[in-house]
Image (cartoon, rainbow, N blue to C red):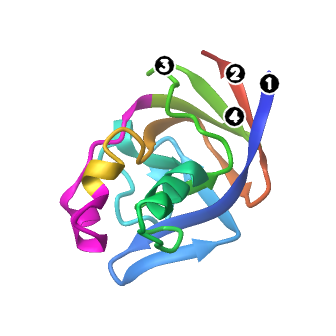
Amino acid sequence: MLIVGKVLELFYSTNNGRINTTELALDNKGVIKDKYYNKNIQRSVLITSKDSYNLAKTHGIDVPYSSLGENILIDYNPYYLKPGAKVMIGELVLEISQNCTLCESLSKVDAKLPQILKEDRGIFAKVISGATIKKDDSICLLNE
């Protein structure tokens, strides 16, 4: 087990907008309380690196955290991880399922954002072993 980083911010979506929280409960159906809970297990958790926000900023787009739709913002860039790789955050075990596809919502933030973050928006994961995670929890790679 290799510690590679930590959790910076946690978010979930509601019908009234995005909520920043100090802890996030997840089970095998996704992020509990999230409006997308139990919708698509393969895409139930979006992990984004702070690097994505830094990349946008280098192109003159300075947006607040959660603008990319992430549930978990981390200080480590996991975008090279292949589907099937497992990540542990606190007691939570996630399996990377796919790279994040770009969606129309990014264009609402800035028209240039989808092209800038084409390969760097985030990765989707499914929950293997649920738990509650907190800001500052360590991120460990279990396998690659």
95 versus 8 height, above or below: above
Look at the image and tell me in which quarter the C terminus lies. top right
Q: Residue furthest bottom?
A: 16
* Distance Cα–Cα, label 1 vs label 2: 7 Å
Between 38 and 85, the one lying in front of the other is: 85
Q: Secondary structure at mark 4?
A: strand
Q: Secondary structure at mark 3?
A: loop
Q: Residue 8: percent from the left, percent from the top?
A: 69, 59
Q: Residues within 10 Å of mark 1 (few under 14, many from 20)?
A: few
Residues at circles 4 and 2 in contact by the CB criterion of under 8 Å:
yes
| Residue lying at 53% horizontally and 69% vertically, measured from the top left | 65
Query: Label 1 belongs to which residue?
Result: 2
Earlier sequence position, callout 2 versus callout 3: 3
Task: Based on the picture, tell me whether residue 75 belongs to the magenta stretch.
Answer: no
Q: Secondary structure at mark 1?
A: strand
Taking 78 as reference, is 38 left or right? left
Look at the image and tell me in which quarter the N terminus lies. top right
* Distance Cα–Cα, label 1 vs label 4: 10 Å
Rendered image: mark on residue 142: 2
81 versus 71 height, above or below: above
Give the residue type at disc 2: Leu
Query: Label 4 belongs to which residue?
Result: 88
